[in-house]
Every structure is written in C-alpha cells, then in structure tokens.
Image: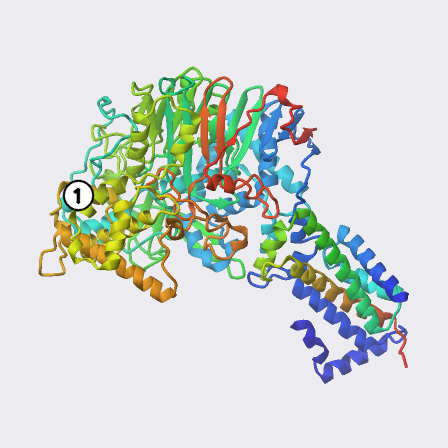
Amino acid sequence: MLWAKQPYTGHRSIVSIKFLSSVIISLPMRTVPFLISAVATAGLVFVLNKQWGSIPPLGKFISPQHGFWQNAEPAGQSFNADLHFTDLKGKADVYFDERLVPHVFAENDEDLYFIQGYLHAKFRLFQMDLQTRAAAGRASEIAGKKAINFDKEQRRLGMVYAAENAMKELEKDPVSKTMFDAYTKGINAYIHSLKASQLPIEYKLLNLQPEEWTNLRTALLLKMMAKMLSSGTESDFANTNAQAVFTPDELKLLYPQTPDSLLPIVPKGTAFDAPGIVPVKPATADSLYLGKKEPVTFSEEDRPDIDNGSNNWVVAGSKTKSGAPILCNDPHLELSLPSIWYEMQLVSPTTNSYGVSLPGSPFIIIGFNDSIAWGVTNSQRDVKDYYEVKFKDRSKKEYWYNGEWKATTLKEEIIRVRGGKDVKDTVAYTVFGPVMFDETFSTRSTHKRNLAVRWVAHDASNEGMTFYKLNRAKNYDDYLSAISNFQCPGQNFVFASHSGDIALWQQGKFPARWERQGLYIMPGEDSSYLWQGFIPQAENPHSKNPERGYLQSANQRPADSTYPYFIPGSYITARGITIDNYLSGMTGITPEDMMKLQNNYFNTTAQDVREILLRYVKENELGEKEKQYLGIVKDWDLMASPDSKGQTLFTMWWGSLQESIYTDEFRQTKQNMKWPDAQTTLELLKKDTAMRFIDNIGTTQKETIEDVVTGSLKSMSAMIDSVSKQSGKEFSLEWYKRNRPGVYHIMDKGKKDLLPFARTNLHVGGAGDIVNAVKGSHGPSWRMIVQLTTPTEAYGVYPGGQSGNPGSKYYDNYLDYWVEGKYYKLWYMRDGDRTDKNVKWTMKFGR
Amino acid sequence: MKFSVAVILTALLAFISGLFLPWWGIAITSLLTAVIIHQKAWKAMLSGFLGVFLLWAVLAFWTDMKNEGVLSKKIATLLPLGGNSILLIIVTGFIGGLVAGFAAMSGSYLRATPAK
C-alpha cells in the first residue's frame, strides 16, 4: 500500500528532506519522523478517499457520520416534518399511514405536484436519476466502458430526440407546463436540501452526485417507458432473416397474424366500421420487399423483454355480488428494488386520486378517484420500422431519396465514460428517422448496411397529460377525452365508473399499414414505403358495456381477423384465454374472487399440449426414469404452482419438443431468428400432426409426431441426468427452483453484484403465459383491485416497499405479502380523517 | 491519566469534526489532540487510534441497534465480511482508528523535543 512504502523512499530523498528540515530548525520537533508519519497519514486518507474500481472510497463510505451508516434508518424513524419552500403557493399536509403511503392534501394543483416531486425524490431519488441518465444514453458515466454500446444504441434509437420533441409538446400547453414545472421544482427542492451524508446509499457506493431535475428528464423517463413497452414489440430483423430462408407460405404458417384460439380484447363478433384509411401497397413491394432474401447481421444491444405485458379486466355490476363494477390490473414488468412504482394519494380541489405513480413523472398512473377507476396493459403493437438507406459517402452527409441526394442532419454525440476517454459518435437523421445501424455502429458486425428507424415514440406528444386528466375524470366521456391523445406506447386502458359503465380501449397512435408492411426491413430510397397515415383514433379497438358483462386484456391481439387493419405485434394469447374462461363462468363476483384470479396458476397452453404429448408418446420405448417423468406429467393438476414438478417437466418436455421440431429448419442461417411462439406450434399440431416441420430435414428417414414426442421426452430426461451429474447434486424438480423468482436491485443488471440488496429464492410459481405471470425477475409489478361501491373498496400490493433505501425496513416490507398473494386494503383517506388513527406521521408544507 | 484524557479528547474532537467536516476531519483533530496533549509517539498513536476506534465503533453500534441490523447485514455481505454486523462495526472502528493513529503520531512528532 502507498502509505507503507513511504518510509523507504530511498536514501537520497531522506537526505534532501533532512536538508530542507534544517531550514526550519526553530521548531522543536523530530522532523523526519514527523514527515514520514504525516505523509503516511495523508497517503492513508488519499487511499481511503478514492474510488478503486467498484470499491467505494472506504473511509468516506464507512465513516459513521458520513457514509453508509447514515442510511441505516432507525426502525422507529419519525417522518414528521415542518417544511418551508418559497415556491409553494399555499399550505399542504402529507399524512403517512403505517405502510408509509403518503396522502397529500394540497390547496392547489401546483403545490400538489410540487409535493409529489419532493416525495418521489425523498424516497426514490437514485432510481429516477439512474433511469433518466440511462434513458439519455449516459450509462457509461456511471458504469464505465461496458455501457458504451448501450449508450450508443440509446442515442441512435433517438431517445433524447424523442424526449426533446415530447418536452416541446408538454411545454406548449400552459396547464401542462405549470404542472410539470411544479413537479420539477419539488424534486430540486429536495435535492438542494440534501447534505452529503444524507445522499442515498447508491451514490455513496458509486461515489456519485445527484443531478438537477428538469422537464426533459421527466420526458426521458416517459420515453424509457415507451422503449420498454413499444420498442421490443417488432421483430423486423428476425423476420427479415426468416424471409431469407422460408417461402411465403411457410412464413404465414410459422408467424400467423391471428391465432385460431384467440380471445381478443374486443369481444368476438363485434362489427367494425369500414376503415377510414386504406393504405396502398407500393408497386415494387413484391420484387423489392416481399421477395427479398437478404439476411441482416445486426442485432440490438438492449432489447426489451417480450413479456413486458400485463393483465387487466373489469366486470360489470351484473356479474358482481355488490352490484358495482370491479376493475383489476396487474402490469408485468422487470421487477426491481426499489420498485418501479410508488403508491400515493393526491388530493386537491380538482382531484382525489389514489394509486401508483412512477417516480420521475407526476400524476397517478394506475388507480382510481371519486368517480372512476382505470388501469393499463401493453398493446404489444408494432410501431417501429427500419428502412435501408443509401449514403453518398462515408461522411453520411447525404442520402439517396426520391431520385436525388438529400442532406442528412448530423448529430454529434459525446459519451462520457467513467474512468476512460470520451467516445464520439455521429448519428445521421433522415426523413425516416435516425440511422440507428451503419458501418460505425453495430454490436455484432461491420456489415455495410444503413438502417434508419421510424418509431412512433419520436413524434411529438404529451402522454403525461392523459394521466392528469384521468386523475380528474368523472365519467366515460372524460376518460375517453383523457386517453384519446395518448400516442406511445400503445396501451389498453381499462375503465369502470361508479355510475356502472365499463370499457376497454386500445389506445395509441398506430400506423395504418398495407398487408405485411413493416414486418421486414423496408427499402428506404424513396417515399413509397413510408407510413401513409395512422389509424383514426375512433377506430382503435374498443368496447363499452358489452352484454356479457366483462372485458379483459392480457397482451393478446386486440381484435379478431375482421378488424380492417393489418396490425402486427408481439402478442401473447394464452393468458387472455385463461382470464376470459374464468370470467365468463363467474357470477356474484367479490374482490376476493378477483384476488384469486390475479394469483391464478392455471396453464392453459399445457392443457392442450399435454393431450398431444400423452396421445403420441410411445410408452413402450421409455426407460424407468422416463416413465416416472411421464407419470408426473400425467397426474399434474395443470397448475404452475411453486412446488409443482409437473410444471417443470411439462415446460422442459414441451421446450424440447419445439427444439426437435424447429432446430433443423432454423439451422439454415446463422443469423438471429425468432422461433414460432408456443401458441402457433400448438395450433399447428392441433390442426395437423403430420405437419411438415416435424420431419427433420437433416435425416433421410421421415420423422413422425410419435417419434418427436417420444424423442423429446428422452432428451429431456438425458438433460436432467447430465445437469445433475455435472453439478453433483440432484436436479430439483420443484418449479420455483427452475423459474427462480427474485427481485434485484435496480442497478444490478447482471443480477450478481448487489445481491445483498436483492430478494431471491422467492416461493412463487407462475410463468409468462400464466395469469400470475412471474418469470424469473419479471412479473406482476402492482396488483390492484377496485370495487366501485360507495365508498370505494380497493386492494393493492407491489413487490417492494415505499422507501428506496436498502437501510430502511420499508425497502421491501410488501414483498412477503406479494409472494403469499395477499393484498393491503387501500386507505382512501377523506378530509375528515386527518385525525384518524391510521395517520402515523404528518409532514407539513408551507411557504 | 494523560493517556485517557488524550483518548477522550480525540474522540470528542473527532465527533465535532464529523458534524462539520468531511470524514478526514478526524485526521486533523487527532493530530491537534496529540499536539495539545503531548505523549511519546507510540502512546500518541495508540490513544489516537483508540479514540476514533471507540468513537466510530460506538456510533456504528448505536446506529446498528436502532436500525435493528437491517443495513449492516447487507453491507457486511457486500464488503464482504460474511454478513457479520459485529465484524463490520469493528472494521469501521479500525479504519477510523488507523487514520487517527497515524495523524496523532504526526502530532506527537510535530511537538516533540528530541527525547534522549
């Protein structure tokens, strides 16, 4: 260590120090030992004050008056406070209940959102800061050079460009600007009040400072959500590669647009009007587009999870015990600690809304008010396309468009890298959008193709105001006017009112596509492949007060094949079937029934697949162990519950069967391809057990369904053997040990560096296509049930806690409840409850 | 006697510095203490070490008790100290003590007349 070396710096230097010291002989000290010990002290301080790789400055970090000990919140911490800010217009009180949920009572809306900003920052500052920096392509400033490609991709996708467009829009409307400004001021008021010792522990670990909040950062956060929910719902690269290998007929078989078993959001049989816009297929499409057989070698660095889905449903009073509608919602996202959601109640003369908010954005996002309740699921629609453009030369200053060279707009990007040199990147903007991939950027290759990206999230819009208005909506018309300007990410807005209406709208700005437009990379040398317009808002799939008395959405295709538009997407079919089947058979529904349904483990896909597996397996060819596995699958109750062995064996067998069906066909190219989804394969098998893909094209004999079903059971069994041999441990068949549910810290993307801040080995079941959609660290991020009786009866829970501080008992105190499928009764506080015993702490705000 | 006074003064001044100065304020106050209460170098070092060791360990222990060990267990796993909170408290004291000890030794030399 540095300080230990100091005494031995060599003879000559000590001599010269001695010489120097003779100058200050008047001091009564032993100069040499003093200097040595002083230098040792200084060296020690230096070493302990500096970040070494991922090790924080130890002295600073460990000092009980400065470092992490300051974040160890006393179990009996009081949250009472009396705060004064000149930016406030009046007085406001925040009442915290025992779960640390704030109930904010303000005299006006500006103060209300100022305080929401203040509370978000107080309890969740680090996640807001981290997420918006990452959204802007600035992760390398924190994570170092390993994040450079991520940052380049964020910038090349146009995240900042999109956020800037959104910010202009939100500042155009005076009401919107006032609310967003107030929210930003509230966050900054908290940041400015912070002493170094009070910084959230993550800043201390990373040796980092928080940054000022701006309206742009709020816009960035909303664009992060847009990316999460509408950037991974297209498969243009995979489709392009599939097109290079398969015939048009095969493509339609493997990637059908409407599954046979679909139970859509808009009840089947609903009639649709003639389309308001009929896009025209370009004359060259068959030759230049659909007939093209050129694979693409690019792939995205950070592709959002396809299971970023959700469930929501609503039942009308005719089907409930109370006679009032019940609305339910559980958005499925990557789970994290701190949670993506922060629960609160916001009250002013114009609103009284309760629900969850997104730290980094004002308003309640999912919740209810005095008159209505609402929730969201993802539309899964494809709203992002790629165009292949031709640059004149490597300068990227001009590109070929409509028969002439047209100038690009070049944007210089400088990525600052922690512990390294700045990285420069140049992004060319075209009429289509930013050129995301070109010879200077690809995470996998140096293929000389230039792909511009057209994404609805780039268009100016103000999604935040939808929630401002929903928070104040009194009835169906208010709800409809609130959501009708919502553009991206397309969402399924479920609705119920105290007056008894129920509705579900798939809302967003969706391109009107000609058949197969945008499934593959499109030619980008003229305007003929541009989107020709958007589906008129009134024609978005929706339903209000259907006769059957319920509506549901679970990321499935929103409408059946009679919907008059071509609407590709990454749909999930099975969950919607399960929910629909349950709801259609239920009457006299209570909130408890809905809790059970949100936590339901029934595996609809397995119900059909198992039938096929059991019918075609050749039992006489099985060994002892294989017969045992078969027996477990036979006796399985079809529930993906945590201890289920049947779910594990079924999942492995079914996976192995799909592999033996497709591996040979998909081996025809080395490029990324997307396997047909399980639903498609199931439907193919149901229709035709002799379908062509079953035969292995690599062998001379003709494989039958019996061969592949039996073979895949055998290879599953072999895999179990080899895994247990390799690990020297018995392969546990309990589903939760394979699914490995866990919630990790928000900055621990690799799920290994911050395990003490995570909660792992959770005893829950589920899967992506199960109603209780827990898949690893992914799943229901908020479960809410609202019964619109008077007074409103609401329940909710999320896998986390109100405090973002790992040193607080409120960091993860809801998690065990969530695991057990339990709910908290939400306290919809009234003005008269200010002295109620539920109030544990009061924070007073004034000028 | 002198020794215990030095220990107490080191701890007291270190605590006050912690309210106003960055964490390395303990180096300044420990040096100062050693200048005010002059002892032989090794004694000064030991009293400086003990003063801040005790201060930091007691503060950490007190914080940990109120926190019911929620955070210390996590940090003691991260650092890594096997999740042992007591060990973390000792390490906390040791690091502070080390800096203070060296600083106090410097302070002792600063005022020392050559001891023969």
Is residue A136 visible from the viewing direction of this image? no
Locate residue A223: give its quadrant.
top left
Tell which of A802 and A718 is nearer to you: A718
The total number of labels drawn is 1
Left or right of A470: which side holds A379? left
**Residue at (37% x, 52% y) in the render:** A738
> Quick one: A525 or A209, which is closer to the camera?
A209
Chain to which mark 1 belongs = A
Whether residue B103 appears in this view of the structure is yes
Q: Which residue is mark 1?
A: A684
- Residue located farthest toward the bottom when viewing the structure as drawn: A11
Outermost residue, left direction?
A701
Establish if A11 lies above or below A170.
Answer: below
Residue at 33% across, 27% down: A583
Q: Quadrant of the C terminus of chain A?
A: top right
Q: Secondary structure at mark 1?
A: helix
Residue A823 image offset from top left, x and y in percent:
49, 33
Q: Position of residue A253 (x, y in %)?
A: 17, 43
Tell me the amino acid under the disc marked 1.
Leu
User: In the picture provided, is A485 more to the left or to the right than A688?
Assistant: right
Residue A33: which quarter of the image?
A: bottom right
Residue A198 spot, x, y in % from top left: 66, 47
Picture coordinates of residue B63, whole percent (x, y): 70, 50
**Residue at x-position 44% and y-position 36%:** A165
Q: Is residue A662 left or right of residue A731?
A: left
Q: Residues within 10 Å of mark 1 (few under 14, many from 20)?
A: some
Q: Quadrant of the N terminus of chain A?
A: bottom right
User: Which of B49 and A641 lies nearest the eye of the viewer?
Assistant: A641
Say if A793 sits above or below A230 in the image.
above
Please, which colouring scheme is shown?
Answer: rainbow
Q: Is residue B12 left or right of residue A767?
A: right
